[in-house]
Image: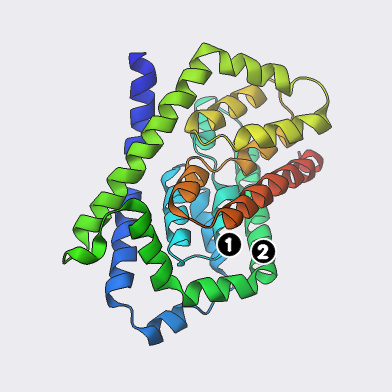
Amino acid sequence: MKEIFLDALKDSVILIPFLFLTYLLLEALEAHVSEKMAKSVGTSRWFDPILGAVLGVVPECGFSAAASSLFSGGALTIGTLVAVFLATSDEMLPIFISENAPLPFIIKVLAVKVGFAAAVGLVLNIVFAKRNRAARQAEEERIEELCENSHCACTEHEGIVKPALIHTVEIVAFVLSVNLILNTIVAIGGGAVLESMAIGNPFLACVVMGLVGLVPNCAVSVAITELYLSGTLSAGAMLSGLLAGSGVGMLVLFRTNRHTKENLTILGVTYLAGILGGYIGGFLF
């Protein structure tokens, strides 16, 4: 039980610097961005999903959590957020390195994830262009929603540090509680269940691993990567799980963004993109 708690604590504490800096930025935007500046920020830059994909591939789930908070505050587009989610791999890279996976293979996996994530993000920004413009123009209002959702009464005191701390502690506590539950499930046999679901039809394996990847816990990426290295999973099924997985990013999104329909759309798009990426990856590896 102690190990379960320590693992959950580690996965949660690592988010603190990412979330704190993110909320500092959002509070600064709310306090200092004028209407004219807000409109200029509302002009979507076409390369944002590419940058999001590159940042997302860094082996830290903190980027996906920070991206979710920025999206909830209206500072990121749907395409950029999904690009971060698809590129995020949590512990995949450290596991590959520790297991001495061939360097060309590692580079190929990272390149496929970044390229696919960026492409999907760019397409989504075109599809949701109208929604993205509206969200950017209402950025201050969406940041205020974050405050109301956290009950931090940001407007009742001066400065940006205190509300940023309140937001950070509230989200980290929430993630910690969920991680404790998920780590307990994995500890009592979740790994064996994953393996049993992965064996069999390669086509179905991509669908199943996409669902598994959606579980908001860093341990999932470890399990998926280890299953591939052990020969249980195909490369395509592994990619489906790792593309659909966003670490705790999806969890933070549902906690910070009140627009449930928007959240479900992002969840569904991420899942379907993960499956598609897995099928494509099956032909590339």
What's the residue type where badge 2 is placed?
Leu
> Is the C-beta separation of discs 2 and 1 under 8 Å?
yes
Residue 231 percent location from the top left of the image: 70, 21
Q: Quadrant of the C terminus?
A: top right
* Residue 281 location, quadrant: top right
Residue 45 placement, left or right of 172 = right
Please rate how many residues cluster around mark 1, counting C-alpha atoms within 10 Å: few if below 14, some from 14 to 19, many from 20.
Answer: many
- Which residue sits furthest left? 158
> Is residue 222 or residue 253 the one in the foreground?
253
Provide the residue designation for mark 2. 124
- Give whichever of discs 2 and 1 has the lower sequence position: 1
What's the residue type where badge 1 is placed?
Ile
Residue 111 percent location from the top left of the image: 63, 50
Count all numbered tags in the image, as a single digit.
Answer: 2
Q: Quadrant of the N terminus?
A: top left
Q: Residue at x 63, y 73 (%)?
A: 129
Instruction: Let me know if residue 285 appears in the view.
Output: yes
Callout 1: helix, strand or loop?
helix
Provide the residue designation for mark 1. 78
Q: Residue at x 69, y 39 (%)?
A: 240
Residue 103 percent location from the top left of the image: 59, 37
Residue 138 percent location from the top left of the image: 46, 74
Instruction: Let me know if residue 58 appears in the view.
Output: no
Q: Which mark is residue 1?
A: none
> Is residue 92 or residue 271 the one in the foreground?
271
State whether residue 150 is above or below residue 281.
Answer: below
Distance from label 2 to label 1 (Cα)? 7 Å
